[in-house]
Image (cartoon, coloured by chain):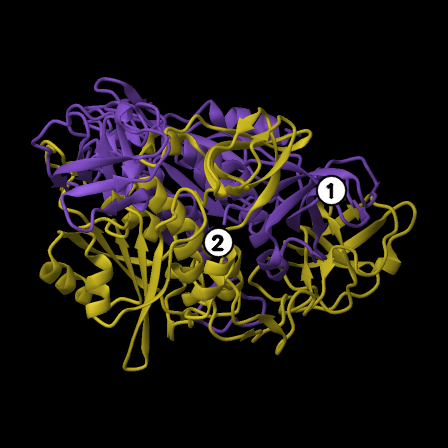
Chain colours: A yellow, B purple
Amino acid sequence: MLSVNEALKLIKQHVTVLADEAVGLSDAIGRVLATDCHSTLDSPPYDKSMVDGYAIRSADLTESGGQFQILEEVIAGAVPTQSISQDTTTAIMTGAPIPKGADAVIMVEYSTRHPESPDVVVLNHDPVNAGTNILYQGTTLKVGDKVLQAGHAISPATVGLLAELGVSAPNVFRLANVAILSTGDELVPIDQQPGPGQIRNSNGPLLQSLVRNAGAVDRVLGVGRDNLDQLESLIQEGLNCEILVLSGGVSAGVKDLVPQALSNLGVKEIFHKVNLKPGKPLWFGIAESDDRKRLVFGLPGNPVSSMVCFLLFVVPAIRALHGGSFAPLSSMRATLTETFKQRGDRPTYYPGVMESSDDGIIVKPLRWKGSADQLTLTMANCLVCFPAGVGEFSASEDVSVFPLPW
Amino acid sequence: MLSVNEALKLIKQHVTVLADEAVGLSDAIGRVLATDCHSTLDSPPYDKSMVDGYAIRSADLTESGGQFQILEEVIAGAVPTQSISQDTTTAIMTGAPIPKGADAVIMVEYSTRHPESPDVVVLNHDPVNAGTNILYQGTTLKVGDKVLQAGHAISPATVGLLAELGVSAPNVFRLANVAILSTGDELVPIDQQPGPGQIRNSNGPLLQSLVRNAGAVDRVLGVGRDNLDQLESLIQEGLNCEILVLSGGVSAGVKDLVPQALSNLGVKEIFHKVNLKPGKPLWFGIAESDDRKRLVFGLPGNPVSSMVCFLLFVVPAIRALHGGSFAPLSSMRATLTETFKQRGDRPTYYPGVMESSDDGIIVKPLRWKGSADQLTLTMANCLVCFPAGVGEFSASEDVSVFPLPW
């Protein structure tokens, strides 16, 4: 059976980044830049004061401070009109341009206006070096510098920088449409009371949330019944999206028609079954036509298996379609707070609660009741991975944990 | 001067959770439950098969397996009609109810249909205990159990659980409206070329992104000029929101009219200035009227100071308004990868890049060029906190890091 990493490699081979589009800056958070971004300005655009204070020639300040004639007051947004010469100063605000002749700014806190001559200020400050409290033109950005590379994920900090550069509609990669199809005759809509042998279709809303959490666009197709014609029609609709996620119908049961429906529609199986728990029955295939490649994930019907497979396999594909790198769910090492008995022969992803302590990251596995147990998962903030073949893990042993991305 | 923690305590005193409302499940991610949630069903709702296979009486399986007469086939969504007696079985799919009389299910992988009698199956499997591959009714949820508490933040996993319980419109706390007002005569709109002494209003889009990232609703008021009447009119509009965030205009400069405008409108100052860098000029006040309390944050005008103050002080307030706990930005310990010289006498929040290594979390401070340097912040994934009063930190020393929430 394929390992998780082997399965990821196969998926990666079929992922191609989407086309690009321009989006308004306020909708750009989380999107990935499709083109490099160069600076169109110097930042700061002029030598600027970093404080409210008095612009002087540093040479004019002695051990006992100094007394200066105020030439003018320059607020942020205004421009100095006079040059500073010996023992003259301009009152200047944070962000305002440094007047010619000045090479330092003394903070307003060290100043006293002369009681009789309001245009004279006494600065009680030790001598300073040239450049004190001045941010020189082009210190942080210079015209023409490459400031952001294609592939950069736009954060609020990036939005601030792009706004400073006047980029009001950055060029980013398109978002993936992800179709969601739950399958199974036992499923009823969530606002309906399940009859005997029935359960509510919780996978639909779960997968919709996971798609949104991954930053993609959800297209909910509803429930496919165990009926080949109806299944094929829904799958056909789903193949209009870059990714189709099915849940249920991928085990080896008599009525598991999904693989057959997919095959009838020309979806080619890439792999079926991966060595992990929960999630072994994972199915992955592709549909190619008109230069378009669609990814199809058949997730197990149990909601927890569905979620684990989505996080491990679908999220990396979405990220790569969006222009990010195809990377596995990020993990870190953590120390077990209690002993844990691993049952079964597959690597197991177990819900846990991790936290930062003085001794590093620690993690406590939760008492999970199997792959239908959604309740325990609502209390978890990570998945703990226990490798196969080790029976018992002792407290203080290190394991891999995957923080849940919410 | 107030410490960061003292300032947080003062803010906390004025935060009251918002009213509740019902929202559709697909819009509920990230929202906080306003009422406890009890289970309306047993989960599973019946004793159910965890595998595709054959339901039998465990007593009928011997060391050499067994041969069974197939009574019927039950798919998920269907209900068994016959009881299992000695050496009879029902073919059953994952999720289907266990027929009466059966107490174990043997996986289909261990079965061979009899070549001549298709209604006879041979099970090549060692003896099993009662309960094998059965998930009993009510194992994960029982009718009446409290499953989620008010205050729980809804994750995709919660959406799955709520869907299972038939909660299609959970009761959650309202989202805060956050008004954003940039101030300063030097600001021009981002699609405009700045003239001499001007800069683009990057704080507007930056703060809008930060508000959205924190899950609140942004209301962008535009730019307040250094003109008391116009400022008062915009602030008045902002006071319709639960939070008003101003940027700029809170230093001690001549034209800093913001504190005056706020005072004229009855906004009461709670504190001004906090002992941190960047962000010292932070201003916080409240406006009370008609049983409503509005929080007003005056953030420094430099974009990086603005962002640090937003993350440290505004985000906890938003979280608490949304029904979460009022908690400081979460932090962890990390090991410096290089020496760092701390300049200045205040605790400093410095952009850095942290990562998980075999030796735990490590962090590298970035070469930051001061509080107008947005570029460096786009490369950071955390803030590193260097306490005041320590001149030099050596490589391998531990410091606090605050992962950026994106």
The spot of residue B274 in percent (x, y) is 62, 34
Chain of the residue under label 1:
B
Tags 2 and 1 both on a single chain:
no
Q: Tell me which residue sits at (35%, 29%) in the image.
A: B127
Badge 1 marks a residue whose secondary structure is strand
The spot of residue A209 in percent (x, y) is 31, 47
Query: In this view of the protein, which residue sits in the foreground, B310 or A236?
Result: A236
Gap between marks 2 and 1 measured at Cα = 31 Å
Q: Tell me which residue sits at (38%, 75%) in the image.
A: A19
Within-10-Å neighbours for mark 1: few <14, some 14–19, many 20+: many
Residue at the spot of label 2: A4
Within-10-Å neighbours for mark 2: few <14, some 14–19, many 20+: some
Q: Is residue A354 visible?
A: yes
Amino acid of disc 1? Thr
Residue at the spot of label 1: B335
Determine whether, in the image, residue A314 is placed left or right of residue A264: right
Q: Tell me which residue sits at (79%, 46%) in the image.
A: A122
Determine whether, in the image, residue A64 is placed left or right of residue B209: right
The spot of residue B238 in percent (x, y) is 35, 43
Of the two numbered discs 2 and 1 in the rendering, the one whose residue sits closer to the viewer: 2
Chain of the residue under label 2:
A
